[in-house]
Image (tube, helix red, strand yellow):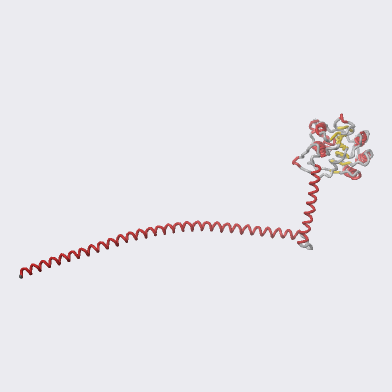
């Protein structure tokens, strides 16, 4: 009995130990399972956090780059503001300067409103004058038979009356038309005729002829008469005739014929004025291109020299031969040693209701 109980007790002890061992192992297993899940969860959490950190760092880098761009833009805007302020300062200074000039131009006893109204009236008057000039230009456009353009396309207001039905142009071809000074005339007279024909003063006279003929009304008639001690038409076979301005080919022939003339001899206004009487009808407008008072009358002088007073008497004697009530327009190229010429020719232009001009050396 005792042995049996002892055996039972031993068996009980063994079972208890087995149970205890199994329980401890189960605890350890549970602990391991829990610890593993914690480690896995920790690793997963760390991966998510690292991703978020990387995204935040990327956002920070983009923000820093954007900040640099904004700073550069701000600097550019500041520079533009400084430049605009500088321009504004200059504009203000200019406005003040112009206001000071305007204030200086306006009389003290005139208000700004009155000055503005006065300027408006002047502008309106100028606009009306421009309108009239344009209308006149339109009416006259296309009426010239030939064109003439001077050096540099210069255009002069001459005041010459270029109208008329029968227009006579008298061109002085005496030796004095070679130069403005006596010493140069003497020098040129001894040179080759080709050089004489290219003399500056004579070239200006020929250009003046071209200018005149280019301004004649197309519906008019004309005649060019050259004179020194004698008078004749520039085209010899047209003596006693009136030529048509519309005949451009004949105008060109006239210009070429004049360029083949070599100025020579003295000057007789009496003979050329007498020649006008051979034209029928008589001219209703006369142009005289010369450089001074005549050196002889209808006949050569007795001596070799002519004084200023004698030239004046010869001139006044010649003027009596002019057709009555016909305007005489004078283009004078003054010559050395003939101070009375400008006064006498100006009086002639005034008394006949013509015009007088003494052009500059670069005209036309």
What x and y, as percent, mark residue 146?
Answer: 79, 36
Residue 267 in the image, given as x and y percentages of width and height: 89, 36
* Residue 15 appearing in the image: yes
Query: In this rendering, is residue 234 above or below 45?
Result: above
Residue 117 percent location from the top left of the image: 78, 59
Q: Position of residue 167 (x, y in %)?
A: 87, 38
Q: Which residue lies furthest to the top in this view?
A: 237
**Above or below, 220 relative to 20:** above
Marks counted in the figure total 0
Question: In front: 120, or 152?
Answer: 120
Is residue 241 or residue 157 the one in the foreground?
A: 241
- Looking at the rendered image, the quarter that the C terminus falls into is top right
Q: In the rendered image, which quarter contains the N terminus? A: bottom left
Front residue of 226/19: it is: 19
Name the image quarter holding residue 47: bottom left
| Residue 161 in which image quadrant | top right
Which residue: 80% across, 50% down? 129
Quarter occupied by residue 60: bottom left
Tell me if residue 190 can be seen: no
């Amino acid at each position: 009995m005792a042995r049996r109980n002892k055996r039972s007790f031993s068996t009980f002890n063994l079972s208890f130990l087995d149970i205890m061992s199994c329980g401890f192992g189960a605890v350890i297993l549970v602990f391991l399972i829990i610890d593993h899940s914690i480690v896995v969860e920790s690793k997963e959490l760390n991966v998510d956090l690292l991703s978020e950190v990387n995204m935040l760092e990327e956002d920070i880098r983009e923000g820093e780059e954007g900040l640099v761009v904004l700073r550069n833009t701000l600097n550019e805007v500041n520079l533009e503001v400084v430049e605009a302020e500088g321009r504004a300062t200059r504009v203000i200074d200019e406005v003040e300067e112009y206001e000071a000039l305007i204030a200086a131009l306006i009389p003290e006893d005139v208000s700004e409103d009155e000055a503005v109204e006065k300027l408006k009236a002047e502008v309106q008057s100028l606009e009306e004058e421009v309108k009239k000039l344009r209308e006149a230009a339109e009416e006259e456009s296309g009426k010239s038979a030939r064109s003439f353009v001077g050096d540099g396309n210069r255009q002069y207001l001459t005041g010459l009356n270029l109208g008329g039905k029968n227009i006579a142009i008298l061109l002085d071809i005496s030796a004095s038309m070679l130069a403005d000074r006596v010493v140069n005339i003497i020098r040129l007279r001894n040179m080759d005729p080709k050089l004489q024909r290219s003399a500056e003063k004579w070239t200006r006279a020929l250009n003046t002829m071209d200018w005149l003929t280019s301004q004649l009304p197309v519906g008019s008639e004309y005649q060019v008469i050259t004179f020194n001690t004698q008078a004749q038409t520039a085209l010899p076979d047209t003596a006693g005739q009136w030529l048509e301005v519309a005949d451009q080919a004949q105008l060109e022939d006239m210009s070429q014929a004049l360029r083949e003339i070599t100025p020579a001899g003295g000057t007789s206004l009496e003979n050329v004025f007498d020649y006008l009487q051979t034209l029928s009808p008589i001219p209703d407008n006369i142009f005289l291109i010369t450089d001074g008072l005549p050196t002889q009358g209808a006949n050569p002088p007795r001596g070799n020299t002519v004084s200023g007073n004698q030239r004046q008497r010869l001139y006044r004697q010649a003027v009596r031969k002019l057709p009555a009530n016909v305007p005489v327009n004078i283009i004078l190229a003054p010559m050395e040693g003939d101070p009375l010429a400008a006064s006498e020719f100006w009086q002639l232009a005034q008394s006949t209701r013509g015009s007088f001009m003494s052009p500059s050396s670069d005209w036309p």
